[in-house]
Image (cartoon, rainbow, N blue to C red):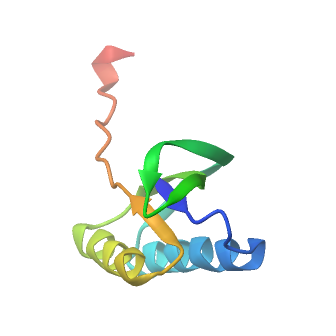
Amino acid sequence: MLLLNPEAETARQTEILDRIKKTATDGDGTVDKVEEWGKKRLAYEINHIRDAFYYVITLTISTAALDEISRILRITDEVIRFMPVALKEKVASES
């Protein structure tokens, strides 16, 4: 999940998402899905910011690629918060 500053221009948001996608694919990973949830109210203020643009990005990547994406997001001013979460793989016998 990725939260971007509500004052970030659409072009800048696209640039950040493209950088994430490029880093994932350069590391032999795949971008499975990008869900744009739009501008939503935060549960609590973060650095005097009340709203954020929410994105849920589903990736299949290596640990090294995830580390690089995390590094990029940490130094990007428009990023309010991000949280990588590992999804459990669906086991064939559970279907």
Residue 25 in percent (x, y) is at: 48, 75
Residue shown at 58%/76% (left/top)?
A: 16
Tell me, yes or no, if residue 33 can be seen here.
Answer: no
Residue 74 in percent (x, y) is at: 35, 76
* Residue at the extreme right: 10
Q: Is residue 40 left or right of residue 30?
A: right
Residue 9, placed above or below residue 49: below
Tell me, yes or no, if residue 39 can be seen here.
Answer: yes
Nearer to the camera, 48 or 11: 48
Number of numbered callouts drawn: 0
Residue 91 in percent (x, y) is at: 29, 27
Q: Is residue 19 left or right of residue 74?
A: right
Where is residue 61, by image quadrant?
bottom left
Residue shown at 76%/71% (left/top)?
A: 10
Residue 63 in percent (x, y) is at: 23, 67
Residue 80, placed above or below residue 33: below
Q: Can you say which quadrant of the picture contains the C terminus?
A: top left
Residue shown at 39%/81% (left/top)?
A: 72
* Residue at the extreme front: 48
Residue 38, placed above or below residue 23: above
Residue shown at 46%/51% (left/top)?
A: 45
Q: Is residue 16 left or right of residue 12?
A: left
